[in-house]
Image (cartoon, coloured by chain):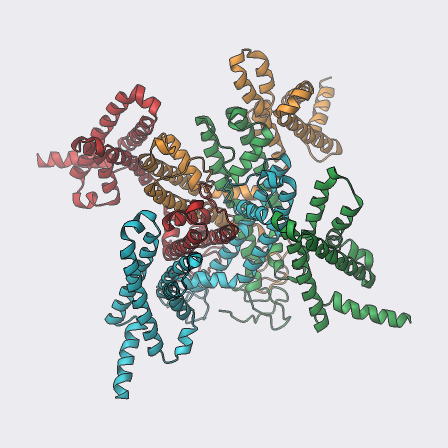
Chain colours: A cyan, B red, C green, D orange
């Protein structure tokens, strides 16, 4: 009996967690399409015209997928050998977050909470993050970012300090009557300027303000080089490592290009072929 | 007779497909200028003032070039040794697409279809893509993009997920009364923000919305580094291969790294030292 | 007596300048939080609504921190073995600048000076720059920028010349009636355009103006590559040096390139092979 | 007599073209400041308020510098051993262009030509380009751009084709009533979008238009990576060449870092010290 159960568990585990068997592949495909349709439902429901005509169907579809993903979530827990590890894993948490909002919308009743409920519903969009699970090519990018994480932190830190300084200066120079109503708003303007987004909802009107703006823009234009430099340098380094998995069997040296056939250091002719 | 025909075919083939003979070069020059004038006709015809005065002449010019390019298209098919290969090649399809719109505008009559007809006419602009054919220097760029294609896909995927999440959040926080009328429109806003375009047609009005905007901008500002990093790293790698002018004296092949001592293709041990 | 004083001085020095003892760590943490709260006070006080309700408390808080930082400043001078060196050091000056504004606001009375006083108060934000002191990871970034300082200067010089030329052209072409009221304002517009900020407060209205704008945008889009290239190339070079973990077994020095076989410092021939 | 003249010529040549003697240095400094003041005059004269009050003085100053630079220009021709070479050199032409506008404003009289005269006057700003002459550090940047010139041409070519295609599509989709009054104007919009400037003077209003906009933005965001990649890769390559001027006297190999003392290939201990 227990053996039969464990056999079912094993089969389900192969289907749900595995990606090698035909059944496992089919399950993954169905899951991805369900996620995409579910997200599309939320997005389309937000369009006033569509909500008026098809709101009822969007509601049914949303609940259909919520129940489906709920069953899937508990199946995953049931199947896991170490359920707690799954529950507190990155995707375990995302799986949970992507079904909670629909249920919360039921429990919490009250017109004034409506806004919050809608916000929670929107979180179902996170479910699409599941898709990332199926991509392993993202590793190189991730590793590049990870290697440069401290430099990226310092970069953001610098941007934040600069935005405080420029924001305060602009608040004093331009003042509330030109749209710079407070330092937080001026900081918002500075970020809009430094990142070169430039909405134009708030713009400097005075000569002094425009001069400070020029400094902020040139600063932004320059420091845009820094994250690029960090990521590029790290990525080039990672790329070099990935590309040079080839080792010469004679002198044992690495660093060969992917199309090399002979060792460039000792001339040995048996370099392995890499993808 | 058949011999004469094949001789004409050969001559035409040299002129039309070849670029080495004076006649071939002349043909290519005439073709490029025809394409440029043809595109200019479409562009100028779109200016209301010019259309009112010279619309008739633009119409004649357009048909002149359409007929010219139609003859050229069928000549290319007739000359080709394997016509189907040409027809379904990249440039064969572009050649076809760039003559179809004018004919379609004849067949489909009806005021309400006018808009679509205009759109098809605009596609004649694609004819200019022919120009790319004459450039072989683009290969390095193409190869760099090709090598990084999977990383670029992941990058776009990340941008799309982020735009859905930020878009939904902004729709809930700002809502229709601040211009965020639906999630699709909020996604449009997010792309405008993340790519640092920042039209300013929709801007956050609430403190919370401005805070989320700041996050979106900083995210965009940071991930701009990723495609740059990908392309740069790939291009540096490609460039290094191209730049190295070392030639193996035995097999005559280039593409060796500057610090290589042995030919990586044939193992010959006398690669010259390059500055 | 003198011994006792010098002993107190030493203890204080360990706490204030040191970061290794528990007391030193605690002091640093308290200082950082004081700075953050003090900055938050200035920022929140600038919001009209909050100033109306809590302005009094913000005023007390501001003076509390001003006095605290004043005491800290004089303690640092008292403790230092070479006080003048501290006073004229980068952080000595920032420490001073971040307490002066509050006192200046007392001395200078007069309604028309109010604006300036506010500006000086805002300078207290500089105090946050102290935080940078605790980061040593910033060195790599700094060195990359330092190595490329001359190239960066030339880059900025080019941007300024371009902005003068484009600005003057646009002033003549568009003129005051389209918002280009003077060459300085046109230069402001050019910087907004070249840096791809694009507020949209001033936009070209004539065909000629839009054509010049296109040139300015494409110029900006292209030269954005230059600072990035500078920083990236320098950073990759710095990174390569840092990353290489090879240690010479004879002189123990690191910083060797991955393909090095002999120590570049002492010439020892047994550098280990690194993956 | 002839000997005396040639002696004067030689002395003047040392002062005007040379930069090594004290007199030559002084001349260069005076020239730079004259250029800066002259440019400032033109810029300030364009401000309506200043022109009303000080227009007379700006006029005198402008003519003072025009005469000064005219004398300088003819002196340069007189001194040159091969005057024609100077006249048709890059700086010879700039020297001429920077004095012509003032004289042209005298000859051409007529109210309706006034606008053109103003434009010619603005060209005096070009005189500032002389400053570049004093910088030799710009060479590395120039060479990087020169090495990548063909790739940069292909890049611009791609941007122009894309702007034609996107521009035409948007003209058809959005049409004149949403601000896309002609294909040239739509191309202007596309460049504004692709370069991520985003003024917001013309924005898509329809769903289809916003979708095409998103494609244009993502395209722009991606291809911004290409010029950066080109310049960075070229610059890294140039930097590498500049940094490794060191050659091992024993094995003759290059590629040593600036701080290397021993050859990393053969261990020889006499690497030259480079700045």
- Left or right, B253 with respect to A1, comes to right
Q: Position of residue A147 (x, y in %)?
A: 51, 63
Would you place residue D96 above or below residue A253 in this image? above
Based on the displayed image, in which of its 4 quarters is residue C210 positioned? top left
Screen quadrant of the N terminus of chain C: bottom right
A256 or A138, nearer to the observer:
A138
| Residue D139 in sight | yes
Residue D131 placement (x, y as % from top left):
63, 33
Q: Is residue D193 left or right of residue C151?
A: left
Q: Position of residue D23 (x, y in %)?
A: 75, 31
Q: Nearer the viewer, residue D151 or A145?
A: A145
Looking at the picture, does residue A174 appear above or below residue A148?
above
Q: Residue furthest right?
A: C1
All told, the count of numbered labels is 0
Residue furthest left in the image: B1
Tell whether D197 sits left or right of C99: left
Dividing the picture into quadrants, the one containing residue B79 is top left
**Residue in view at x 68 percent, y 48 percent:** C122
Residue closest to the eye, A187 or C213: A187
Q: Please say whether residue D71 is visible from this viewpoint.
A: no
Relative to the observer, which residue lies in front, D127 or B211? B211
Counting from the top left corner in percent of width and height, residue A30 is at 26, 65
Vertical arrangement, residue B267 with respect to residue B106, above or below? below
Horizontal relation, residue B164 to residue C75: left or right: left
């Amino acid at each position: 009996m227990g053996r039969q159960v464990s056999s079912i568990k094993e089969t389900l585990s192969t289907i749900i967690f595995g990606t090698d068997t035909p059944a496992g592949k089919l399950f993954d495909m169905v899951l991805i399409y369900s996620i995409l349709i579910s997200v599309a439902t939320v997005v389309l429901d937000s369009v006033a015209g569509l909500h008026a005509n098809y709101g009822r169907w969007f509601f049914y579809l949303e609940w259909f997928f919520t129940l489906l993903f709920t069953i899937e979530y508990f199946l995953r827990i049931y199947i896991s050998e170490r359920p707690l590890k799954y529950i507190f894993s990155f995707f375990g948490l995302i799986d949970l977050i992507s079904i909670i909002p629909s249920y919360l919308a039921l429990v919490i009743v009250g017109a004034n909470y409506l806004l919050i409920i809608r916000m929670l519903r929107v979180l179902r969009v996170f479910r699409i993050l599941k898709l990332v699970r199926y991509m392993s090519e993202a590793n190189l990018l991730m590793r590049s970012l990870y290697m440069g994480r401290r430099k990226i932190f310092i970069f953001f830190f610098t941007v934040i300090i600069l935005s405080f300084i420029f924001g305060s200066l602009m608040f004093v120079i331009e003042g509330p009557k030109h749209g710079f109503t407070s330092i937080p708003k001026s900081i918002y303007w500075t970020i809009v300027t430094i990142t070169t987004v430039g909405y134009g909802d708030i713009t400097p009107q005075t000569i002094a303000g425009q001069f400070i703006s020029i400094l902020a823009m040139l600063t932004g234009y320059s420091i845009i080089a820094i994250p690029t430099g960090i990521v590029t340098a790290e990525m080039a380094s990672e790329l070099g490592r990935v590309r040079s998995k080839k080792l010469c069997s004679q002198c044992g040296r690495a660093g060969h290009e992917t199309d090399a056939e002979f060792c460039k250091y000792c001339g040995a002719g048996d370099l392995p072929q890499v993808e």
